[in-house]
Image (cartoon, grey):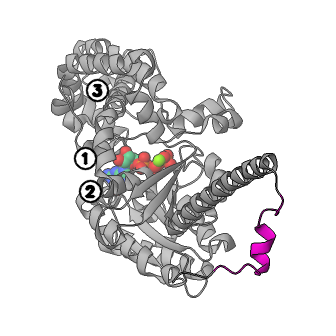
């Protein structure tokens, strides 16, 4: 419909040019009008962009992944990336080689340290203390063991170089604890440097300054391949195995254990597999945001923002700003840690620390609207520990005289987490809990699909928050 022009309309009259306008006055007026039009268009464009950004912000699912150090937070996010953001996963996979080499070199150097200590005890250089608990005179150590420690010496430099390439995340809390107690660093220094997650580290490896990362990869690869036979000899040696057993050291269950994969990794053309990446250990320092756009299923239009945090005690205050505006929390509780103490504070049992952290999260008023999903993780290691005869009641007195089998132990843990959740949570919040081993990528993919479904279909969506 064409609207008729009405010369008496007040708005038309107000914007009409003056009747006796000169040509110069018309030029100035038209210039002003053109400028006003451009300003108006710019404002419109800015408003539109803001509206789109707001809409996107509202549509993003924000998931905070919490838990103590070594609980499996980063590993859970890696699984998420592997399943739902395959492009970036494949692009990054090769860069994990540096971390895997570092993990391998650390395991070997750790064993060599123990072996060297035993050799010194056997020679009477070091006293045989309760801690070492091994009697040098019957140890069966030979000159071969001594020469092995010398032949593996190049791995020290590899560890140091890779550590300096990978930054503060490549050291573990026990190193930090040692430095702190020796007065060699301060908490503040550590906190200030705590800014990166694996994305930034891998980015640095992929775009190194002056090709540093690339050449180090090559050198590390050559040294490890060159030491392959000696590493294999060290790991498979009966005396070495006996020493580790006597000292109650199970390197197989430690993070970043790759000695069983030596034949594959100690090769010049080694390329990390998905499983290798999931098992690689790089400690998170600070808080890192990961954005995934889910390209499968019903959630295809949603962005997922996942926040990975540092789990060590001294870094937990940095979690609080992220409690605002989140949709869900995935809380990692490593059940296998029942017989371990925190590296950053060896007076505290790891499971006690997890229970108290869980209590804090469940009863936080800031989080009362947030869905909490519990992953009772590392059940593969738990199973091995129980099978080897380690008794839960020796470490957790409340467990009392119950049977030490896997089913009884896991049911009991589940009940304790449930009790804490009920006590701290608002009555409407249900507990969603899974037993997990997040290094098992197949079963974790199923768990993550269930988690996704819960987050997207629960009350949060119905309440219009998404
Ligand atoms: N066997 C086994 N290993 C696991 C499991 N979950 C994690 N890991 C390993 O444990 C190590 C630590 O896992 P991360 O995901 O780095 O731990 P985190 O919670 O991010 O630790 P921080 O970054 O220090 O806070 C890695 O080497 C993982 O591969 C599990 O269920 N079973
Ligand atoms: Mg981490």
Query: Residue 105: x percent and y percent?
Result: 34, 26
| Residue with the mark numbered 1 | 275
Q: Main secondary structure of the magenta part?
A: loop
Q: Foreground: 153 or 6?
A: 6
Whether the residue carrying mark 2 lies under 8 Å from ligand 1 is answered with no
Marked residue nearer the N-terminal end (3 or 1): 3
The reply to whether callout 2 and callout 3 are in contact (CB within 8 Å) is no
Where residue 325 sits, quadrant-wise, is bottom right
Disc 1 + disc 2, Cβ < 8 Å: yes
Residue in the image at 69% along x and 28% along y: 183
Q: Is residue 13 magenta?
A: yes
Of labels 2 and 3, the one closer to you:
2
Question: Tags 3 and 1 in contact by the CB under 8 Å rule?
Answer: no
Which callout, 1 or 2, points at the residue further toward the start of the chain? 1
Relative depth, front residue between 371 and 317: 371
Q: Magenta segment, which residues?
A: 5-20
- Left or right, 370 with respect to 276, comes to right
Q: Is residue 88 above or below residue 455?
A: above
> What residue is shown at x 82% (from left), y 56% (from top)?
21
Give the Cα distance between marks 2 and 3. Answer: 41 Å
Residue 82 tag number: none
Residue 316, position in %: x, y?
A: 62, 52
User: What's the distance in space between the residues labelled 1 and 2, CA to CA?
Assistant: 7 Å
According to the picture, the residue beneath numbered tag 3 turns out to be 139
Looking at the image, residue 164 lies above or below residue 435? above
Neighbourhood count class around disc 2 (C-alpha, 10 Å): few under 14, some 14–19, many 20 upward: many
Whether residue 237 is visible, yes or no, is: yes
């Amino acid at each position: 419909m064409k609207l008729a022009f009405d010369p008496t309309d007040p708005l038309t009259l107000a914007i009409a040019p003056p009747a006796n306008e000169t040509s110069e006055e018309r030029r100035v007026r038209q210039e002003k009008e053109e400028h006003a039009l451009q300003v108006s268009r710019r404002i419109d464009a800015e408003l539109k962009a803001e509206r789109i950004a707001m809409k996107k912000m509202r549509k993003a699912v924000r998931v905070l992944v919490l838990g103590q150090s070594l609980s499996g937070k980063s590993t859970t996010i890696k699984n998420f990336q592997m399943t739902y953001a395959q492009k970036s996963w494949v692009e990054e996979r090769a860069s994990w080689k540096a971390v895997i080499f570092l993990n391998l070199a650390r395991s070997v150097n750790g064993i060599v340290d123990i072996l060297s200590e035993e050799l010194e005890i056997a020679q009477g250089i070091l006293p045989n203390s309760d801690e070492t608990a091994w009697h040098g005179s019957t140890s069966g150590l030979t000159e071969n063991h001594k020469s092995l420690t010398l032949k593996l010496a190049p791995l020290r430099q590899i560890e140091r170089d890779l550590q300096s390439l990978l930054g503060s995340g490549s050291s573990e809390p026990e190193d930090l604890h040692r430095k702190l107690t020796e007065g060699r660093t301060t908490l503040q220094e550590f906190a200030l440097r705590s800014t990166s997650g694996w994305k930034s580290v891998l980015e640095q490896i992929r775009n190194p300054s002056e090709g540093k990362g690339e050449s180090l990869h090559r050198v590390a690869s050559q040294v490890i391949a060159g030491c392959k036979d000696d590493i294999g000899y060290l790991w498979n040696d009966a005396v070495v195995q006996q020493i580790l057993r006597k000292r109650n050291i199970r390197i197989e269950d430690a993070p970043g254990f790759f000695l069983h994969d030596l034949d594959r990794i100690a090769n010049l053309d080694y390329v990390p597999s998905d499983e290798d990446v999931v098992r690689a250990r790089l400690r998170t320092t600070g808080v890192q945001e990961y954005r995934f756009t889910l390209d499968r299923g019903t959630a295809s239009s949603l962005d997922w923002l996942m926040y990975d945090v540092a789990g060590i005690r001294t870094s937990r205050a940095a979690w609080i700003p992220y409690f605002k505006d989140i949709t869900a929390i995935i809380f990692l509780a490593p059940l296998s840690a029942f017989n371990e103490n925190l590296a950053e504070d060896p007076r505290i049992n790891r499971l006690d620390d997890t229970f108290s952290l869980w209590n804090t999260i469940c009863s936080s008023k800031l989080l009362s609207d947030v869905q909490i999903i519990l992953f009772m993780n590392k059940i593969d290691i738990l199973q091995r520990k129980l099978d080897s005869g380690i008794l839960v009641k020796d470490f957790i007195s409340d467990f009392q005289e119950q049977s030490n089998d896997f089913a009884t132990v896991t049911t009991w843990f589940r009940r304790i987490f449930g009790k804490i959740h009920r006590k701290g949570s608002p009555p409407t919040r249900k507990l969603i809990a899974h037993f997990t081993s997040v290094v098992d990528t197949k079963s974790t993919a199923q768990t993550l699909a269930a988690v996704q479904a819960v987050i997207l279909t629960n009350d949060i969506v119905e309440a219009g928050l998404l």
